[in-house]
Image (tube, grey):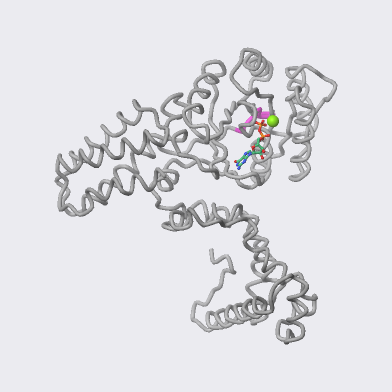
Amino acid sequence: SLSERLESAFKQIKGEGRITELNVAATVKDIRRALVDADVNYKIAKEFTDKIKDKAMGEKVLTAVSPGQLMVKIVKDELAELMGGTEAELNAKGNPAVILIAGLQGSGKTTFSGKLANYLKSKKFSPLLVAADIYRPAAIDQLKVLGGQIGVEVFSEPENKDAVDIARKAVAQARTLNKNVVIIDTAGRLAVDEAMMTEVSNIKAAVNPQEILFVVDSMTGQDAVNTAKAFNDRLDFSGVVLTKLDGDTRGGAALSIKYTVNKPIKFISSGEKLDTLDVFYPERMAQRILGMGDITTLVERAQAQFDEAEAKKLEKKIRKNQFDFEDFKQQLEQIKKMGNIKDLLGMIPGVGKAIKDIDISDDAFKGIEAMINSMTPFERANPDVIDGSRRKRIAKGSGKDLTEVNAFMKQFEQMKEMMKMMNKMPMGRMPGLGGF
Ligand code: GDP
Ligand code: MG
């Protein structure tokens, strides 16, 4: 992966006492190769590494820092710069604000539209989703399902074969319904073509959007950059959304797009679940690329799922040593809502690489859940009553071995012991199982 390649590039310079022209040149060459292999355009990679070289040589007087660390910092800063430097805000001000979503078919427009509506709703906006993909009847249903899941109204006119007209009516409807932001999901095609471009351009002209977000599948590498260029030439969009970053992407798209179209990446999407949308922070992405983890995003995801009242209740129970299996189950639910487990673990510095080849599915908790589900409510609330015969029944009910149930019960006891100990500590605050 790009992270690994960069890491080994840094190795060259790590043991060195100081930065010299020779060791910088070797490191820089490796970095350039790593970038090109990750689908970064050669010209961009070259310009990037030339900059790194200049900076590194310029700082050779700094002998206090180890050359390896200095190099990593320079590369991190430059990577962030290449991806836009600082985060770009979404403009959702208007009466209503109109956000037009464009991109190829399958890039993730409809999914993103749902995620964005969900995101804006959590920021106290009242969004209206608009189904302007008139070519596939299933597209309307897809958006309606998403809208239903997040409690956001969807405007659609299944009989209307004029996307521009639908968009226009939707904006008028939003005013009537007191919605302050309209998200228009449009049709895409498998490749850039004139009909699609004309249609989106016409919608743009008709509704005068505050934002035009170009959605692109990050797994498509160089193609992503070419598509971005084609859309930008016609639409002059205001921001980019990179999707499918949870997949086995080589990272090149994130690195080249901003440079190529000079438009900021505003969001990244990393999963099919509706809450796996993140604002794009160049600095954090640079850290991720360098295998430094992304604790900030992890904490934010946790906070988004974090119910203050529930947390208080839980803390009380832990303090009184009353934490039971029902609480345990709820905690698991909360962790699961934060998104794909592997993706989450990968945000912890150093862990991403370690678990890269391990298959951690979202079903990681299934066994535990099955065991808890096989307990009666009484047992869940009173773990102490779960004796040998009850364990046998739980094993049977959950399809697990008795040894597995015993091991789980033991783990649970140990966890409670730990909570007890933490309660005795002066500042013994236990923020819950998530540990965030
Ligand atoms: P559209 O044709 O541009 O509207 O694309 P869709 O929103 O229908 O998405 C196409 C497929 O990609 C669907 O199966 C989605 O579930 C999936 N998808 C969308 N965004 C993501 C993402 O961030 N990660 C993953 N893994 N799949 C995604
Ligand atoms: Mg769609």
Which is nearer the eye, 161 or 314? 161
> Which quadrant of the rendered structure holds the N terminus?
top left
> Does residue 432 lie above or below 183 as drawn?
below
Residue extent of the magenta highlight: 92-98
Q: In the drawing, does residue 133 fall left or right of residue 59?
A: right
Tell me if residue 392 comes above or below residue 358 in the rendering: below
Where 202 falls versus 57 (above or below)?
above
Seen from the viewer's position, the closer of residues 80 and 310 is 80
Q: Which one is nearer the viewer's eye here, 368 or 401?
A: 401
Rendered residue at 56%/31% (across/down)? 216
Q: Which quarter holds ligand 2?
A: top right
Residue 188 point in image, percent of width and height: 66, 24
Q: Position of residue 122 (x, y in %)?
A: 66, 46
Whether residue 226 is visible to the viewer of this picture, yes or no, is yes
Q: Is residue 24 above or below residue 213?
A: below
Residue at image x 17%, y 46%? Answer: 19
Given the current orientation, which residue lies at the most extreme right position?
A: 159
Residue 95 part of the magenta-drawn span? yes
Please tell me which residue is depicted at 78% across the width and 40% down the height of the picture: 145
| Side of 289 relative to 101 (left or right) | left
Q: Quadrant of residue 179?
A: top right
